[in-house]
């Protein structure tokens, strides 16, 4: 098999149609059909079910798809690494991060990295930790900032996790409205369950942490609204529609929010940098890793706005 065949195979799975895939690849449809026929002949098995113009993957095609994606990603990485060795001031880094990290730590990292390395293209993928881990394994990401552990032995065999910082979860409410809690200094989980709360979508790692804590304490949250993404939830909170539990770093430079530490229990999460162990980082990738460490250290440094809420992992 060759890379052209694999590109054609992946394009067909994305579009579900040979003609649209051929247009995407700037090929004639018969040429793409011959590539796939040759690939199937070489492998000795059919990859697609072709029924009345509908194209779906066979069981063999399902098995091949993640392998093909990894092979194409590795080929592209090899191209960029060779370009760097040739002295080109260009390249690309694909960084994944959870939604909450994209609005805090990642903003600072990308701003500084772009200023120092304007020739490097940055691609950001915003998703939940489990999806980012899958993308790393498939080879469609170079690095990822996640807030979960590696749950399977297969993940641990392919990926390396480097803890960066330990972040507390805090409760935010609208600063222009009376505090919904008896104390402005702290709020317990039981007190939190009594006030209207804005809940994030089910696929948020943060939502899972809150649901687990409530269940363990035999509490039922007072849900004012559910499904809002981070930016919308913070705006709703500012307008007094409810309170929200968010990571401490989210609260930096948001003077319209009142921040109250969550206690009994203290809820924290570990932010880690994940990468594949079987691929050495490019020069640009190594520079980005170093900057991520530097920015994370600043969030925990004495005098930082989050000094008492974020600690070194």
Image: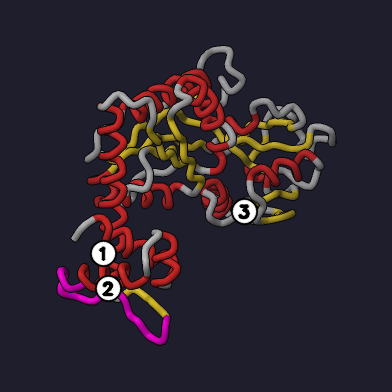
Give yes or no for residue 38 being in the magenta stretch: no
Q: Mark 3: which secondary structure?
A: loop
Left or right, residue 275 beside residue 303: left
Q: Residue furthest right?
A: 177
Q: Mark 1: which secondary structure?
A: helix
**Could you tell which of marks 1 and 3 lies nearer the N-terminus?**
1
Crowd rating for badge 2 (residues with CA inside 10 Å; few <14, some 14–19, many 20+): many
Give yes or no for residue 48 being in the magenta stretch: yes
**x then y, percent, for residue 73:** 31, 48
Q: Nearer the viewer, mark 1 or mark 3?
A: 1
Left or right, residue 275 beside residue 117: left
Foreground of the two, 226 or 217: 226
Q: Would you name the residue on which mark 3 appears?
A: 219
Left or right, residue 295 beside residue 79: right
Q: Residue at x 38, y 85 (%)?
A: 51
Q: Residue at x 58, y 13 (%)?
A: 303
Q: Nearer the viewer, mark 1 or mark 2?
A: 2
**Could you tell which of marks 2 and 3 lies nearer the N-terminus?**
2
**Could you tell which of marks 1 and 2 lies nearer the N-terminus?**
2
In which quadrant of the rendered image does the N terminus lie? Answer: bottom left
Q: Is residue 191 visible?
A: no
Q: Is residue 44 visible?
A: yes
Q: In 3D space, how far apart are the residues under numbered discs 1 and 3 (Cα atoms)?
A: 45 Å
| Quarter location, residue 218 | bottom right
Q: Would you name the residue on which mark 2 appears?
A: 47
Relative to 41, is 9 above or below? above
Residue range corresponding to the magenta coloring: 40-53
Relative to 69, is 233 above or below? above
Left or right, residue 141 beside residue 116: left
Tags 1 and 2 in contact by the CB under 8 Å rule?
Answer: yes
**x then y, percent, for residue 60:** 25, 72
Q: Would you name the residue on which mark 1 appears?
A: 64
């Amino acid at each position: 098999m060759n890379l052209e065949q694999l590109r054609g195979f992946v394009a067909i799975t994305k579009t579900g149609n040979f003609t649209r895939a051929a247009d995407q690849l700037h090929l004639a449809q018969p040429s793409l059909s011959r590539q796939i026929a040759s690939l199937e002949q070489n492998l000795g098995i059919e990859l697609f079910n072709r029924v009345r113009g509908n194209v779906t993957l066979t069981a063999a095609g399902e098995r091949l798809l993640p392998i093909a994606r990894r092979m194409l990603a590795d080929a592209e990485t090899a191209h960029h690494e060779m370009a760097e060795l040739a002295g080109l001031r260009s390249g690309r880094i694909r960084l994944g991060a959870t939604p909450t990290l994209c609005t805090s730590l990642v903003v600072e990292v990308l701003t500084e990295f772009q200023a120092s390395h304007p020739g490097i293209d940055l691609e950001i993928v915003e998703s939940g930790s489990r999806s980012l881990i899958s993308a790393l394994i498939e080879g469609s990401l170079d690095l990822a900032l996640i807030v979960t552990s590696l749950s399977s032995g297969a993940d641990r065999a392919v990926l390396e996790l480097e803890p960066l910082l330990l972040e507390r979860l805090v409760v935010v409410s609208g600063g222009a409205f009376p505090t919904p809690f008896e104390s402005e200094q702290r709020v317990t989980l039981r007190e939190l369950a009594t006030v209207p709360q804005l809940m994030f979508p089910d696929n948020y790692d943060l939502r899972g942490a809150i649901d687990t804590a409530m269940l363990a304490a035999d509490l039922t949250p007072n849900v004012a609204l559910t499904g809002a993404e981070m930016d919308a939830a913070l705006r709703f909170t500012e307008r007094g529609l409810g309170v929200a539990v968010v990571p401490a770093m989210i609260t930096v430079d948001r003077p319209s929010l009142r921040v109250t530490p969550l206690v009994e229990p203290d809820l924290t999460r570990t932010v880690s940098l994940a990468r594949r162990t079987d691929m050495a980082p490019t020069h640009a990738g190594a520079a980005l890793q170093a900057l991520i460490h530097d920015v994370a250290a600043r969030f925990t440094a004495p005098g930082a706005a989050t000094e008492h809420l974020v600690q070194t992992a």
